[in-house]
C-alpha cells in the first residue's frame, strides 16, 4: 500500500464552522480516512501545539488553514503550517479575505478592546482591567498572544497555494479538492477551487434583461417574490460580484447573497466592484435622485465588505503592511 | 512550582489554554483559563441593520 | 504640507471628449502642468471604482475622472 497522505487542519481567528463543513462531507470522510492520516486537527481530535511542532518541515501533504490572522500566535501558526505543508490551502472566507472578523478592521484594535472590556453593557469592569501580554501570577508567569493592528487574510502573511472559498466552504468543493490531491491533478497555483462566474449565473430566480432599481428596501419590510431577482425587488444582494459555486444557496433559501465566496477572478477589491455593480443598476436622472435611492441602502460598508475587508485596498496605505510583514 | 500547560484546548471551537500550577506535594495550587483571541463582535455589530445580525453573529461560533 | 508639494494626479479621460480636449490643448500648444498623468479610457462609464482605489494604492494624490 502506498504511503498515506497527511492532512492537517489549523484553526485561527475563526468560528469553527469550516471544520464542521469538513465533517459535513458525511461518508466521504471514510474515503478521506482511507486516503490520508490526519496529523493535526485540534478542533476535532486531541492535538496540542507540541504535536504540530513535532511534524518535520514538509511533513504535511496538505495543510488546511481556516480563520483570519488576528494575533501573533496566528502568525506563528501560519508560518509553521507553511513550512510543514507541501500544499497550503486557505480554507474558508476568513483565511481567504479576512471574513467576518475583518469587519473589525473599521476600528483600531484599541477601539475594539475598549468596547469589549470597558463599555459593553454586559461587562462590569470598574478597575479597567485589561488582558496583559504577561502576567505574573503568584504561582508563575502567564502569557497571552499580542493582538495585531487588524485582521489579515492568510496570504497577506504567508504564501498560499490554493483557496477554498465560502462561509463555510461547500462540501462539493472540499470533495473536489481532496479528489484533485488524490489523483495528483492539482490545478495551477493560486486557483480558487469553486466556480468561475458570478452567483447570478447560478441563481434560479428570474431576472429581466436590464436590471433597474428605483428603491432599496429592507428584506423584512417587503413580501418578496421567490421567483424574482432580489435586486430587482430592491433588496440588496451581493450576487453580481460574488464568485459562484454555492448554487446560490442563500438566495434559494430566500436570503440575499452576502458575498462569502469572494470576488470573481481579476477583481482586486470586492467592495469597489460591488459598489460599481450597484451604481450601474440604480435608475436616477439627477444626483439628488441617486442620493435619495442610495441613502436607503443603510449599511453599504457592511454589505460590500461583509467578508472581505482584510483584502480590500481601503485602509492599507500604499501597499504598506505593518504587522503582517515577515 | 510545576506548571502544566494545555494549549490549545482541543475538541471545541474557540481558542483557550489552561495553565495548572502544582505545589510541592503534587496537588493543584491554582489553575488559570485563558482566552487568547480577540475579534471584536461587540464593536462591529453595533450600527449594522438588525436583520443582518442573524447572518453575522453565527460566526461567533460555527460549531 | 511643504510648499513645494507637487501632487501626482491620475486623469482618467474619456477618449471622445476629455481626451480629445487634452489633445486639442496639445496641438494648440497650450501648456499645462505635468502633474496630471492622463490615461485614456473609451468612456468615463468604463471607469470602475477599483481603478480609483488602485491609483491611490499606487501613490496617486488625486484622481480626476473626466468625460
Image (cartoon, rainbow, N blue to C red):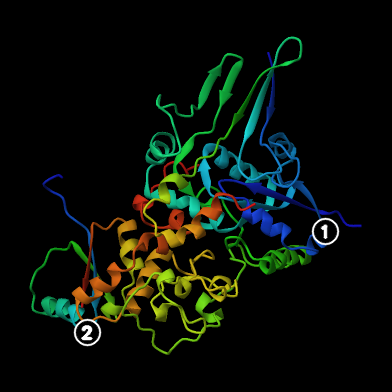
Q: Is residue B61 above or below residue B20?
A: below
Q: Position of residue A235 (x, y in %)?
A: 41, 74
Q: Position of residue A19 (x, y in %)?
A: 67, 54
Helix, strand, or loop for circle 1? helix
Q: Quadrant of residue A261?
A: bottom right
Badges 1 and 2: C-beta atoms under 8 Å apart? no
Q: Quadrant of residue C25?
A: bottom left
How many numbered discs sit on the rendered protein?
2
Residue at 44 percent across and 26 percent down: it is: A129
Q: Position of residue A22 (x, y in %)?
A: 70, 58
Helix, strand, or loop for circle 2? loop
**Residue bearing mark 2:** C16
**Residue bearing mark 1:** A35
Q: Residues within 10 Å of mark 2 (few under 14, many from 20)?
A: some
Kindly identify which chain the residue marked by label 2 belongs to: C
Residue at 45 percent across and 68 percent down: it is: A267
Q: Is residue A24 above or below residue C18?
A: above
Furthest-bottom residue in this view: A209
Furthest-right residue in this view: A1
**Toward the viewer: C26 or A271?**
A271
> How far apart, in angstroms, are the residues tagged by discs 1 and 2?
61 Å
Please indicate, yes or no, whether residue A276 appears anywhere in the rendered image. yes
Kindly identify which chain the residue marked by label 1 belongs to: A
Res. A136 mark: none
**Toward the viewer: A253 or A1?**
A253
Amino acid at each position: 500500500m502506498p504511503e498515506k497522505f497527511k492532512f492537517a487542519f489549523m484553526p485561527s481567528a475563526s468560528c469553527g464552522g469550516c471544520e464542521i463543513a469538513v465533517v459535513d462531507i458525511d461518508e466521504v470522510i471514510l474515503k478521506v480516512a482511507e486516503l490520508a492520516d490526519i496529523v493535526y486537527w485540534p478542533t476535532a481530535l486531541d492535538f496540542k501545539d507540541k504535536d504540530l511542532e513535532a511534524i518535520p518541515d514538509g511533513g504535511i501533504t496538505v495543510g488546511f488553514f481556516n480563520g483570519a490572522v488576528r494575533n501573533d500566535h496566528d502568525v506563528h501558526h501560519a508560518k509553521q503550517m507553511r513550512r510543514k505543508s507541501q500544499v497550503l490551502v486557505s480554507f474558508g472566507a476568513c483565511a481567504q479575505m479576512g471574513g467576518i472578523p475583518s469587519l473589525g478592521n473599521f476600528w483600531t484594535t484599541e477601539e475594539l478592546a475598549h468596547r469589549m472590556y470597558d463599555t459593553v453593557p454586559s461587562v462590569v469592569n470598574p478597575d479597567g482591567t485589561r488582558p496583559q501580554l504577561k502576567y505574573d501570577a503568584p504561582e508563575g508567569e502567564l502569557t497571552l498572544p499580542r493582538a495585531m493592528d487588524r485582521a489579515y487574510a492568510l496570504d497577506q502573511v504567508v504564501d498560499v497555494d490554493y483557496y477554498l472559498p465560502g462561509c463555510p466552504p461547500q462540501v462539493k468543493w472540499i470533495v473536489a479538492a481532496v479528489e484533485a490531491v488524490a489523483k495528483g491533478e492539482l490545478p495551477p497555483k493560486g486557483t480558487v477551487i469553486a466556480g468561475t462566474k458570478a452567483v447570478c449565473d447560478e441563481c434560479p430566480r428570474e431576472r429581466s434583461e436590464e436590471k433597474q432599481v428605483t428603491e432599496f428596501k429592507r428584506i423584512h419590510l417587503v413580501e418578496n417574490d421567490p421567483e424574482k431577482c432580489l435586486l430587482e425587488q430592491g433588496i440588496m444582494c451581493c450576487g453580481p460580484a460574488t464568485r459562484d459555486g454555492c448554487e446560490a444557496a442563500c438566495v434559494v433559501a430566500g436570503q440575499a447573497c452576502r458575498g462569502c465566496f469572494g470576488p470573481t477572478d481579476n477583481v482586486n477589491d470586492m467592495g469597489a466592484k460591488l459598489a460599481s455593480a450597484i451604481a450601474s443598476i440604480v435608475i436616477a436622472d439627477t444626483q439628488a435622485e441617486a442620493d435619495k435611492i442610495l441613502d436607503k441602502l443603510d449599511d453599504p460598508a457592511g454589505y460590500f465588505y461583509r467578508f472581505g475587508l482584510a483584502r480590500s485596498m481601503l485602509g492599507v496605505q500604499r501597499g504598506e503592511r505593518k504587522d503582517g510583514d515577515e | 512550582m510545576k506548571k502544566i500547560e494545555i494549549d490549545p484546548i482541543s475538541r471545541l471551537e474557540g481558542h483557550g489554554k489552561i495553565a495548572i500550577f502544582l505545589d510541592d506535594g503534587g496537588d493543584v495550587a491554582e489553575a488559570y483559563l485563558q482566552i487568547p483571541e480577540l475579534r471584536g463582535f461587540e464593536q462591529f455589530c453595533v450600527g449594522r441593520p438588525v436583520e443582518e445580525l442573524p447572518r453575522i453573529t453565527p460566526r461567533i461560533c460555527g460549531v | 504640507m511643504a510648499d513645494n508639494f507637487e501632487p501626482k494626479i491620475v486623469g482618467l479621460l474619456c477618449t471622445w471628449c476629455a481626451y480629445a480636449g487634452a489633445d486639442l490643448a496639445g496641438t494648440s500648444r497650450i501648456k499645462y502642468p505635468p502633474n496630471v498623468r492622463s490615461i485614456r479610457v473609451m468612456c468615463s462609464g468604463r471607469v470602475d471604482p477599483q481603478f480609483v482605489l488602485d491609483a491611490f494604492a499606487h501613490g496617486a494624490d488625486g484622481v480626476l475622472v473626466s468625460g
